[in-house]
């Protein structure tokens, strides 16, 4: 029996409901809701299995509406932040070891030592979080396996973007997380936004897809191009939303939701 989910289009409102306003959930605040995420789907993404023919690899997926945004969409970045996550190796069960909400100071897991088992290595390796992220050295190359100076950083850097979608404002705000093989694209976008010397919420960004390869493995990552300034009516919305979500703290996604990229899972040793 198939377990695939049926996609229901909730954008078509019956005429008799068009005058109805949201009610019944007014006692809830922002902490009671999940800001939807946008994911760039890979062949092994669960959505590809759950929404066959609708969710396909190498397109963007809105998790709140369960809707494809296609291979390209336009957005405005409301706020940008970065954080650091230290996961136990997947091959030994995974799990969150330490987390920094600002990429500087540990929110949890600081001043700890973790004995971890690395794939293909008999001896346990010790990861020390120290007093803060910099002191830990876990963002340095060679930190996951101290015996291999070319080993990937033990901890993962994650860039978080809170976005407004001007062409589909009803799907806004939403978030996009870039990590591992997406970090290089994130840094390129950050540099482009910095050079404009205006707040990100003033600038339209075109988000597309580019393919990358290492050996026989290929995967897709987001590609960004600045697409001019927003118009005045959009600016009046994005500025308010930027202020509202200035202190937004993204959820910690389970590691299994950090997208697999190929059947073998692209190794962290691929350059960022």
Image (cartoon, rainbow, N blue to C red):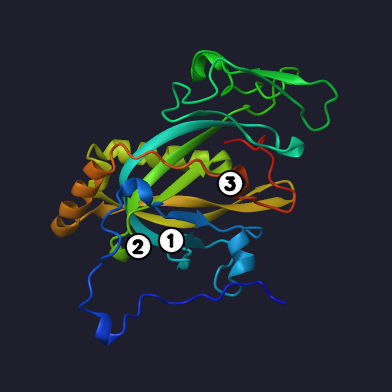
Tell which tag, 2 or 1, sits nearer the viewer: 1
- Expressed as whole percent of the image width and height from the top left, the position of residue 130 reads 55, 13
Instruction: Check disc 1: other Cα within 10 Å, few if <14, some if 14-19, many if 20+.
Output: some
Marks 2 and 1, how far apart at CA: 8 Å
Marks 3 and 2, how far apart at CA: 22 Å
| Mark closer to the chain start, 2 or 1 | 1
Which label number is shown at residue 171?
A: 2
Q: Given contact means CB atoms under 8 Å apart, are the residues at marks 2 and 1 in contact?
A: yes
Q: Quadrant of residue 188?
A: top left
Q: Quadrant of residue 9?
A: bottom left
- Expressed as whole percent of the image width and height from the top left, the position of residue 165 reads 32, 59
Tell which tag, 1 or 3, sits nearer the viewer: 1
Question: As displayed, is residue 223 above or below residue 118?
Answer: below
**Helix, strand or loop at disc 1?**
loop
| Mark closer to the chain start, 3 or 2 | 2
Which label number is shown at residue 1?
A: none
| Mark closer to the chain start, 1 or 3 | 1
**Helix, strand or loop at disc 3?**
loop
Q: Nearer the viewer, residue 177 or 184?
A: 177
**Furthest-right residue in view?**
122
Total labels: the figure holds: 3
- Expressed as whole percent of the image width and height from the top left, the position of residue 67 reads 46, 68
Disc 3: which residue: 258
Residue drawn at the location 69% of the way across and 26% of the way down: 151
Q: Quadrant of residue 266?
A: top right
Question: As displayed, is residue 123 above or below residue 177?
Answer: above
Question: As displayed, is residue 249 above or below residue 166?
Answer: above
């Amino acid at each position: 029996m198939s377990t695939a989910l049926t996609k229901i289009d909730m954008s078509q409102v019956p005429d008799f409901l068009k005058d109805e306003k949201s009610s019944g959930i007014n006692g809830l605040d922002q902490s009671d809701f999940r800001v939807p995420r946008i994911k760039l789907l890979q062949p092994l993404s669960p959505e590809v299995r759950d929404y066959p023919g609708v969710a396909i690899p190498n397109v963007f997926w809105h998790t709140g509406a369960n809707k494809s945004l296609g291979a390209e969409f336009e957005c405005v970045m409301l706020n940008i932040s970065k954080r650091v996550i230290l996961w136990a190796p997947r091959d030994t069960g995974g799990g969150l070891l330490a987390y920094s909400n600002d990429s500087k100071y540990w929110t949890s897991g600081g001043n700890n030592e973790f004995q971890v088992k690395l794939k293909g290595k008999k001896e346990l390796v010790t990861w020390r979080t120290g007093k803060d992220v910099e002191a830990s050295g876990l963002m340095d190359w060679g930190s996951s396996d101290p015996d291999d100076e070319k080993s990937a950083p033990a901890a993962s850097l994650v860039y978080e973007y809170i976005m407004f979608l001007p062409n589909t404002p009803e799907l806004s705000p939403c978030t996009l997380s870039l990590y591992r093989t997406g970090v290089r694209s994130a840094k390129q976008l950050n540099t482009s936004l910095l050079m404009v010397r205006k707040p990100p919420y003033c600038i339209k960004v075109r988000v597309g897809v580019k393919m990358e390869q290492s050996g026989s493995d290929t995967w897709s990552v987001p590609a960004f191009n600045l697409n001019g300034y927003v118009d005045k009516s959009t600016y009046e919305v994005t500025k308010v939303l930027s202020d509202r979500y200035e202190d937004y703290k993204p959820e910690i996604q389970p590691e299994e939701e950090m997208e697999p990229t190929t059947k073998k899972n692209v190794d962290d040793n691929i350059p960022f």
